Structure formats: C-alpha cells, structure tokens
Amino acid sequence: MLGSPEGDSFKKKLIPAQETKSDEDLIIVFSNNIWGFFIFKLNIFH
C-alpha cells in the first residue's frame, strides 16, 4: 500500500470527500499518505 501509484488518485479523491469526512479524519489520512510518500522516496534512494 505504501508508495503505490494509488497515492495520486487517492489525493484527488480526498478533495471531494472533504464534505463527508471530519477535519480530524482528513488530517489523519493526509499524514498517513505523506508518510507513505516519504517511505516510497526513501526506498528509491536505497
């Protein structure tokens, strides 16, 4: 799941989903997505 191509499409889905999700949920999902992105980047440089 981490660093998968689904990340980009997931970010696009996040925008319309803001109305149905609470701010806290969005922050949690967004930070998890950011961490997955960083882990993906680290894996590339290894």
Image (spheres, rainbow, N blue to C red):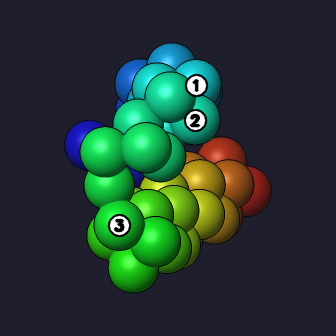
Looking at the picture, which amino acid does disc 1 mark? Lys
Q: Secondary structure at mark 2?
A: helix
Is residue 40 positioned above or below 17 on the image? below
| 3D distance between C-alphas at marks 3 and 1 | 17 Å
Furthest toward the front, the residue is: 19
Q: Which residue is mark 3?
A: 22
Whether residues under marks 3 and 2 lie with C-beta atoms below 8 angstroms apart, the answer is: no
Q: Is residue 36 or residue 11 the one in the foreground?
A: 11
Q: Secondary structure at mark 3?
A: loop
Displayed quadrant of residue 43: bottom right
Q: Secondary structure at mark 1?
A: helix
Q: Which residue is mark 1?
A: 12
Q: Which residue is mark 2?
A: 15
Displayed quadrant of residue 34: bottom right
Please state the horizontal and vertical placement of residue 19, each as a whole percent of the image.
43, 43
Q: Residue at x 46, y 71 (%)?
A: 23
Which mark lies nearer to you, 3 or 1? 3
Looking at the picture, which amino acid does disc 3 mark? Ser
